[in-house]
Image (cartoon, grey):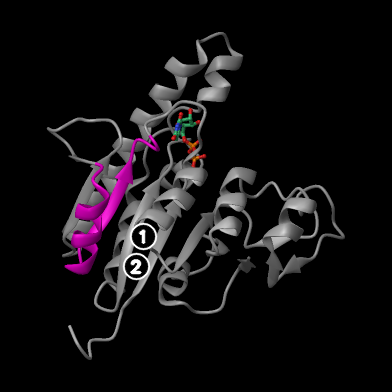
Amino acid sequence: VAGATKRRRVLLKLSGEVFGAGKLGVDPDTIRDIAKQIASTVDTVEVAIVVGGGNFFRGAELSASGMDRSRADYMGMLGTVMNCLALQDFLEQAGVDTRVQSAITMGQVAEAYIPRRAIRHLEKSRVVIFGAGAGLPYFSTDTVAAQRALEVHADVVLMAKNGVDGVYTADPKKDPTAVKLDKLSYDEAMARDIRVMDQTAFSLCKDNNVTMLVFGMEGEGNVARAILGEELGTLVTP
Ligand code: UDP
């Protein structure tokens, strides 16, 4: 529409740790809080979400204890869908229209992943929740967050982290001299071997010129603040 201003569009990545509050399964109080924060932003920002599944299964861990890696990864992907449904429920309770799109077809609970349809939902102020990762073993949901951000043309990837509020010069849990950075480039992040994100996600964002915000879940209202573009965490730029 001529004269219409383009709204900010974000891709938020919520890891399984966020959903489980550090435990196996989902923590309803945490999800309710996140849903309320997201609900407070949807009038002005288009929100797409990629959901992790580490609160249920991580393929690499299951395979280390003897399972076939691909099968274990599919279990991991199915776990993400349970998180999607929980988030969908609390978002709808908060009055937000939502759609779940799954990379593994399961028509009873989710739409299939159809990128153009996802964009249409976003334009209509629906929150789109992407589940089942890429539908491919050997991938992580961090990488999928970068890929989905590119495909739906998000302005920024917002990486919510538990237990850390941004990118540090070293692992702050191991090195007391570690200092938090407000900003760094993807090249610096990759050179420093920053483990807060997987390297594939970094390089996808770098090569395709997308900015990423790494921020901590600890702190009242941080998810809404990140969505609205307030200054927090660490900005990683091409
Ligand atoms: N997974 C996968 N392909 C994908 C995304 C996820 O195989 O495209 C599997 C993988 O086993 C992973 C699990 O799903 O360990 C859960 O995802 P992830 O570990 O990325 O979740 P998070 O760490 O964000 O909770």
Q: Is residue 234 left or right of residue 38?
A: right
x and y, in percent, of residue 4 in the image = 23, 87
Residue beneath the point at 68% across and 59% down: 186
Farthest residue to the bottom: give it: 3
Check the picture and name the quadrant holding the C terminus.
bottom right
Residue at horizontal 37 percent and vertical 44 percent from the top: 27
The magenta stretch is: 113-134
Extreme residue toward the right, this view: 177
Q: Quadrant of residue 38?
A: bottom left
Q: Of the numbered discs in the image, which one, if any, rests on residue 54? A: none
Which residue is situated farthest in the top direction here?
66
Residue 227 position, x and y percent, is 41, 70
* Residue 223 spot, x, y in % from top left: 43, 66
* Residue that appears at 69% across and 46% down: 195
- Viewer-nearest residue: 105 or 35: 105
CB contact under 8 Å: marks 2 and 1: yes
Decide: is 70 above or below 8: above
Residue 36 percent coordinates (x, y): 29, 65
Q: Secondary structure at mark 1?
A: helix
Asked if one can make out residue 171 in the rendered structure from this viewpoint, the answer is no
Nearer the observer, 24 or 38: 38
Of residues 4 and 52, the one drawn nearer to the viewer in this rendering:
4
Q: Nearer the viewer, residue 67 or 221?
A: 67
Quarter holding the N terminus?
Answer: bottom left
* 224, above or below 151, in the image: below
Q: Residue at x 51, y 57 (%)?
A: 160
Q: Which residue is mark 2?
A: 37
Q: Secondary structure at mark 2?
A: helix
Name the residue that disc number 1 marks. Answer: 34
Amino acid residing under circle 1 = Ile
